[in-house]
Image: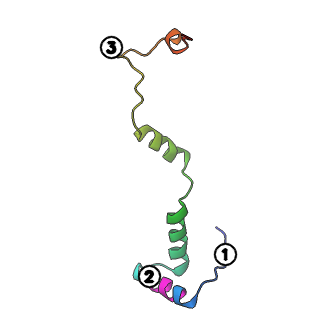
């Protein structure tokens, strides 16, 4: 983790401290989580795989449940 210095209006700072305290968090944790919610965070490899597998199914089988042959896939017609 890196430390950063943030400059903000006193009124905004007061409101941020109140919001952090109401959630039982330090101001640092509150700001960190707020930024993370705004920009997201990188997914781990297992999270990316899980998201991919949870996505819509790939319809590659025909009506008989058979996958296409190589010749059918690469048919240049």
In the image, residue 20 sits, relative to residue 36, either above or below, namely below
Q: Position of residue 43 (x, y in %)?
A: 54, 51
Single out the mark in the foreground, 3 or 1.
Answer: 3
- Find numbered disc 1 in the image and state the secondary structure of the residue it sits on: loop
Q: What's the mark number on residue 4?
A: 1
Which element carries disc 2, helix, strand or loop?
helix
Q: Earlier in the sequence, mark 3 or mark 2?
A: 2
Query: Secondary structure beneath disc 3?
Result: loop
Q: Quadrant of the N terminus?
A: bottom right
Q: Marks 2 and 1, how far apart in space?
A: 20 Å
User: Looking at the rendering, which quadrant does residue 42 occupy?
Assistant: bottom right
* Percent of width and height locating residue 71: 53, 9
Which one is in front, 14 or 48? 14
- Residue positioned 37% across, 17% down in the render: 62
Q: By what rule are the colours in the image chosen?
A: rainbow
Q: Is residue 75 above or below residue 47?
A: above
Q: How many marks?
A: 3
Residues 11 and 35: in front is 11
The tag on residue 64 is 3
Please name the residue that numbered disc 2 is placed on: 19
Sequence-first tag of 2 and 1: 1
The residue depicted at 45 percent of the width and 44 percent of the height is 51
Kindly report the distance in space between the C-alpha atoms of the residues bearing marks 3 and 1.
Answer: 60 Å
State the extent of the magenta-drawn residues as a range. Answer: 13-19
Q: Main secondary structure of the magenta part?
A: helix
């Amino acid at each position: 983790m890196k430390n950063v210095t943030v400059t903000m209006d006193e009124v905004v700072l007061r409101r941020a401290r109140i919001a952090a305290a109401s959630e039982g968090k330090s101001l640092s944790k509150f700001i960190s989580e707020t930024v993370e919610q705004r920009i997201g965070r990188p997914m781990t490899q297992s999270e990316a795989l899980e998201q991919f597998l949870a996505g819509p199914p790939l319809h590659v089988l025909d009506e008989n449940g058979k996958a296409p042959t190589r010749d059918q896939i690469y048919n240049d017609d």
